[in-house]
Image (cartoon, coloured by chain):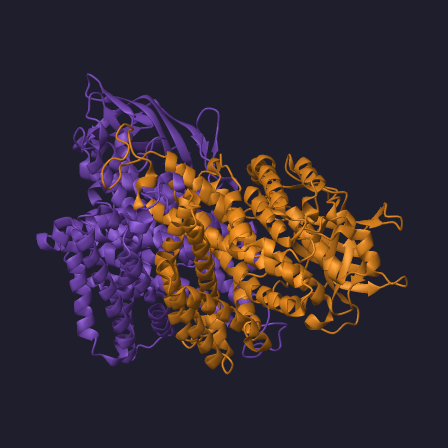
Chain colours: A purple, B orange
Amino acid sequence: MPTYKAPVEDVTFLLNDVFQIDRYDNLPGFSDASADVREAIIGEAAKLSEQVLQPLNRVGDLEGCVRHDDGSVTTPKGFKEAFKQVAEGGWLGLSAPAEYGGQGLPVTLSQVVTEFQSAANMAFSMYGGLTMGATAALMVHGKPEQKKMFVPKMVAGEWTGTMNLTEPQCGTDLGLLRTKAVKQADGSYKITGTKIFISAGEHDLAENIIHLVLARIEGAPAGIKGVSLFVVPKVLVNADGSLGQRNGVSCGSIEHKMGIHGNATCVMNYDGATGWLIGEENKGMQGMFVMMNEARLGVAVQGLAQSEVAYQNAVNYARERLQGRSLTGAKDPDKPADPIIVHPDVRRVLLTIRAFNEAARAMVVWTALKSDVAHRSPDPKDRQEADDHMGLMTPVMKGVMTDVGFSNSVLAQQMYGGHGYIAEHGMEQFVRDARIAMLYEGANGIQALDLVGRKLPRDGGRAVMAFFGEVGAFAKEHGGNEAMKPFVTPLSTALGHLQQATGWLMQNALTKPDNAGAAATDYMQLFGLVTFAYMWARMAKVAQDKIASGGATPYLSTKLVTGRFFMERMLPETSVHLARIQTGCATTMELAAEAF
Amino acid sequence: MPTYKAPVEDVTFLLNDVFQIDRYDNLPGFSDASADVREAIIGEAAKLSEQVLQPLNRVGDLEGCVRHDDGSVTTPKGFKEAFKQVAEGGWLGLSAPAEYGGQGLPVTLSQVVTEFQSAANMAFSMYGGLTMGATAALMVHGKPEQKKMFVPKMVAGEWTGTMNLTEPQCGTDLGLLRTKAVKQADGSYKITGTKIFISAGEHDLAENIIHLVLARIEGAPAGIKGVSLFVVPKVLVNADGSLGQRNGVSCGSIEHKMGIHGNATCVMNYDGATGWLIGEENKGMQGMFVMMNEARLGVAVQGLAQSEVAYQNAVNYARERLQGRSLTGAKDPDKPADPIIVHPDVRRVLLTIRAFNEAARAMVVWTALKSDVAHRSPDPKDRQEADDHMGLMTPVMKGVMTDVGFSNSVLAQQMYGGHGYIAEHGMEQFVRDARIAMLYEGANGIQALDLVGRKLPRDGGRAVMAFFGEVGAFAKEHGGNEAMKPFVTPLSTALGHLQQATGWLMQNALTKPDNAGAAATDYMQLFGLVTFAYMWARMAKVAQDKIASGGATPYLSTKLVTGRFFMERMLPETSVHLARIQTGCATTMELAAEAF
């Protein structure tokens, strides 16, 4: 049976040493998150994930969710009690404003907790994750009475939330959506249509479910400019806040899917359900983008989380499985065979996963801090820079961290040999669960297009130039430091590749958009590698400084070796991405559709 | 629901034009396989796979195999009838010797059929595949009376075969095996022990199952040198060939696994079962290697097969799914959206899969022809060269074709967006089924070690030198041909990388075996890329010649575009593999096992 141990030491190093969260004490909520408080929260989050959520992961996979004839849905055994514990522990409101019952702590802390919970039990953690996303959209775009009615209950985990975008004929292209909204005399709308792939669409964890639904108001323009956002509670809420009548929305079926069986992925039927407009008419995408951006970062963290838990189990197995002998002679001659961790090829795989995990975790903390700055800083320039960073990094993180998170789960499964294919070991579940993260919240090809087509050129390339400036300045500052050369030299080379690729796009994609399309995925992956390299260089610098000042620990030495592995073995891939990008679109676009 | 169409045109091009199978008419069985006969056989094989086996693929996944309390196992609905059709059609004996009831046709044809059947229904095709592997081992190492007793029934598909190697404590390291054999007065042995992961170990498709079992004879030396091979029929066979008593072997349980649910993966309990020695005492690995090499090539074909069927369905979906518009303006303005195949990123993915499939298929045909030469040629030099080729290419094909076959199934699934995660579309089954091929018959890390540690240095590097000579001569011959430059120039560069990597290993791995271990997987992948590039260059040459002589077809033009895509976008990866290999093992081996 798989196990999980939250990476508390790594998170603490990132928060305290690498990103020095205490420097942000001027931001609201940060002074409440002193080192002691952080330690206590992280410790509690670790315990909850390790002891309550992780043991339910396989149960969730085996049992899945069951829809009954009346449309109600039962979640796997133990989920209800665990969700109650999560709600009552205040975990859904960790970074929500105090006026809605939250604790107002930094989003950065909340993201750390998200990784733990998602690693322990991805399907389970989605119920809370979607609730937090829906809450965020309501807080930004909801009317005051909507916020008052829904948000405190959602922050408390008494009610949960969903996002309803996809329909059978439209996923990426939401302009094609058909769900209808008809305005009523009292200002409400009657919503009618079918939504698919609705995660947590129906369940027994909470007494109400607050659906955020995209629909087209009668007479609205065609396409994406005629789409509005509505809030549609499963159970109508009386003026006094008590629950009233059941609304006209129900779960028609649960999808049979590859993984995340513990989460109910529902077909939702809206049959004249009562809903209320959020934000303005025909401006539904604005509200939905708040949710989607939240969700995309959450999905990125899912990629990291599955990679982390799969890694931990692969390491345990590699240390325990006795098979064959080291190529350099028996390491454990008293035993019938050596543990397979003696083999370079096994270590190569383990280090490949680990080097990603630690860089990705740094990227999450870095970006979560920017999210806090963007939402809480009093300085408009800081807010703008942080917002630029978020916009640029969101598609990179969602695309790269879920791609690599999945392939790392596969690598970790491979360490088990044939046993990795057997359900009882749990490795194949990590693979099946991790797979969805590449597909939902915008398939990764869409992330790549968002990066190349939208985020890169936005504001004259301001965000990407700021990133190049920051990385370049770091390389310049530390390039002369002998100890840092194994990190800075490859970082500079890789940054050069990214800059060349960016220049190539500027010269070749404006006049010929297919050159951008043919380059998009390679560009995204190249961007991810450079960002990871930058994270590694920053971590290495801090680790070296701590060691130099007498603070050597096994954790810090391992950090430096893992970082060098990344630079030597993983980063060189940037040259191939650049070469591919520079081939352009000609061959890719040459064939007629029928020729495939 | 997924569909499958056997790639008849591609196979015909390879057999007739690229490898010119008619040149081998001097080999036994080849003159019986004239162009007409081949066409008829390939056509029938296609029909069987498309119409009988493919429709059972999802049924097999959904129903799986069921073990009953008496140890008997029921296969999914329809499997029994389909297996009868396969057996009666003579498909298991296509290339078996006529003296055992086979048709004596080239193995090359048989491998083509294997791809079709495996693409149509991987779990089903394993019942026949394992039978052919066990038959091969019996034919090479069995005593005359053993061959007479078992082989004709197996060739006819009346009985099936299995291979029993793995035990809970040993997979890769078979020297650890504990299953015991005790010699009886009549020359037979009593076999006792537990074997796990036994594919097709028990089922209802045939009236007898012939288990080939590795066990240790009482008093035999420890380790791999004390392992013998036995034939242990499920039902004992009387002297007249009729079935006698049930033997002491039974299925204890069926594994719960990620995929290939239609194949019964059994725990087999041997409880004093009667078996007979195959080959010599303590030389069991020799017989098992015959089977394993057969099986490894079969598994390589499974990788290709899942990639092919996943590709076909991804193409169909990409042509039908309307979503968004082309970056260069609407291509289908009368429809609500364009089909997603207009997008460069979609085509990039599809071409990536296709370019592998066609190169891998060429490699299968090329190597299958070598297998025929190795077994049938009257010329000892030809036999030796062919055998060298097989030894060298078997780990490359098994490792690379299953790695890429799996990752291509994932890419194809990605084309479906969220729908790819839904079971009904069948894409996620291809991914789950393809996953096993990287694990069984020697996990791919073991293939890489086999290549680097055994196959490369064998006979002073004779096999690899012959390969370098052949590819180098091709490049020299066609390097001056302008039309061939887009193929020959990158091929030469890639060959150079492989030669540098080989030289690096020779200089650095003999004294420091961990350098070989740390390089093994990259070397294998580099080797695969160069071989694929060579296949592409050969195919391009033949396609260009046919077009130049007035034989232009859409198939041939597509072939050339796909080949250029491979050269431009996929082959450049060789430089990164070389760079990784050259970093050596230092960083990889630096950490203590506890540090991971």
Q: In the displayed structure, would residue B75 be above or below residue A281?
A: below
Quarter of the image for residue A12 reads bottom left
Residue found at the far top of this picture: A185
Query: In the image, is B264 to the left or to the right of A192?
Result: right
Residue A1 horizontal/vertical position (percent): 53, 54
Q: Position of residue A404 (x, y in %)?
A: 38, 56
* Residue B557: % across, % down: 39, 47
Q: Residue at x 68, y 70 (%)?
A: B224
Give the image location of residue A169, x and y in percent: 34, 30
Taking A155 as reference, is B233 left or right? right
Nearer the observer, B72 or A9: B72
Tell me: residue A460, above or below residue B572. above
Is residue A90 in view?
no
Q: Nearer the viewer, residue B434 or B4?
A: B4
| Viewport quadrant of the C terminus of chain B | bottom left
What residue appears at the point 60 percent right and 65 percent down from the top-left corner?
B386
Q: Residue furthest front?
A: B549
Q: Is residue B382 visible?
A: yes
Q: Is residue A323 above or below residue A186?
A: below
Q: Quadrant of residue A39?
A: bottom left
Q: Give the residue displayed 53% in from the left and 48% down from the top.
A: B11
Name the one closer to the observer, B416 or B492.
B492
User: Depth check: B196 or B107 in front?
Assistant: B107
Query: How many marks do you count on the picture?
Result: 0
